Image (tube, helix red, strand yellow):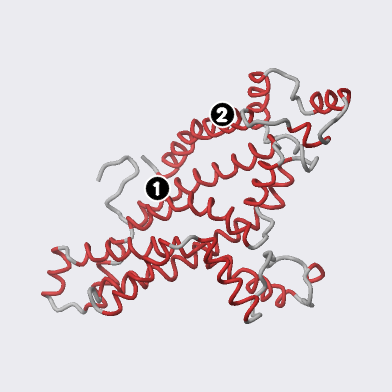
Amino acid sequence: MGRLRYTISRLLQSVPVIVGVITITFFLTDAIPGDPVSIMLGPSPSAQQAAAIRAKFGLDQPLYVRYFNYLFDVLRLDLGTSLYYQVPVTQKIMERLPVTMYLLLASFTFALVTAVPLGIVSAKRRNQPTDHISRVVALFGVSTPSFWIGLMLIIVFSFWLGWLPATNIILPWTGPANVDGASNQIEVIIESLRHLVMPMITLGTLQMAAFTRIERSSMLEVLGEEYVKLARAYGVSESKIVRKHAFRNAQLPLITLVGLQLTSALGGAVLTETVFSINGMGRLIITAIQNQDFQLVMGTTLVFGLAFVIGVIITDLSYAYVDPRVSFDGGE
């Protein structure tokens, strides 16, 4: 099976998943106790006002009619109008999505850049002090809640030392006129990095710890293979064995974990954005749930589901690039 056909096949297989996400989210959101119209209009709205709002947003229609109407609107890329913000849901998502994607990309980059060298060094120096330190760091990262890490970073680096800002994230392509104290784009980028450091570490620490443990165990397994022992017997240097023979074969478990960690990273983004008061998708979905904004809850959940499905497909495609023994039809 060619790469293009495999990609199309995986995309088609994701359609039932997306429909399932929409269906479950729609009915669970509708089952939430309370009335969104009462939240919009106050505790005692007039019957005429409430009826007008229900008619405007289609809330006066039977549940199955609203469900099929929503499915049809999603096919037209219309996610409805937010009850709380009174603007199209797609507009709010497009405002907040770049911030969350920027944070996720930075956290995964931080996690991979630190975890891969740490895992390799730990495997090469097994049961030595370096290995013990690496395992302690990984254990700390796995067992520590991300929100606690964020709060500690704020206390130390913002309130005690005053080095880094404690709130918000500035996108690096923001205009200088919209950033306090910046007169050109270089200063905007510097300010963006200063705002990014603590949220990136907060969100990326869990991923870094998990990646380090997998990288270490995978490298240990590969370094014990017969072909590696043969290379040592031929006098190949240890650094060359790691670089040319072991590293690539040890990355398949890590690639799998990167795809699976996308789910926890999206969930962690909600906490991280709350701790640092970042206006991203995480805070948007919390606002939507607090105000029973049905359309916004379903829209943000759909985007999270799409992001996870795309991440899994990219993970599957990456297998064939890393390991030539893996073919797209499942054979070898």
Q: Is residue 196 above or below residue 289?
A: below
Q: Is residue 210 above or below residue 290?
A: below
Residue 82 lies, in percent from the top left, at: 75, 38
- On the rendered image, what quadrant is the N terminus found in? top left
Q: List the single residue furthest toward the front.
A: 44
Q: Amino acid at mark 2?
A: Thr
Residue 56 lies, in percent from the top left, at: 81, 27
Q: Is residue 311 left or right of residue 102?
A: left
First along the sequence among labels 2 and 1: 2
Q: Which residue is mark 2?
A: 23
Q: Amino acid at mark 1?
A: Asp
Quarter of the view holding residue 41: top right
Q: Which residue is mark 1?
A: 316
Q: Residue at x 30, y 49 (%)?
A: 326
Q: Residue at x 61, y 68 (%)?
A: 196
Q: Is residue 42 left or right of residue 98?
A: right
For label 1, the SS is helix
Q: Residue at x 69, y 64 (%)?
A: 168
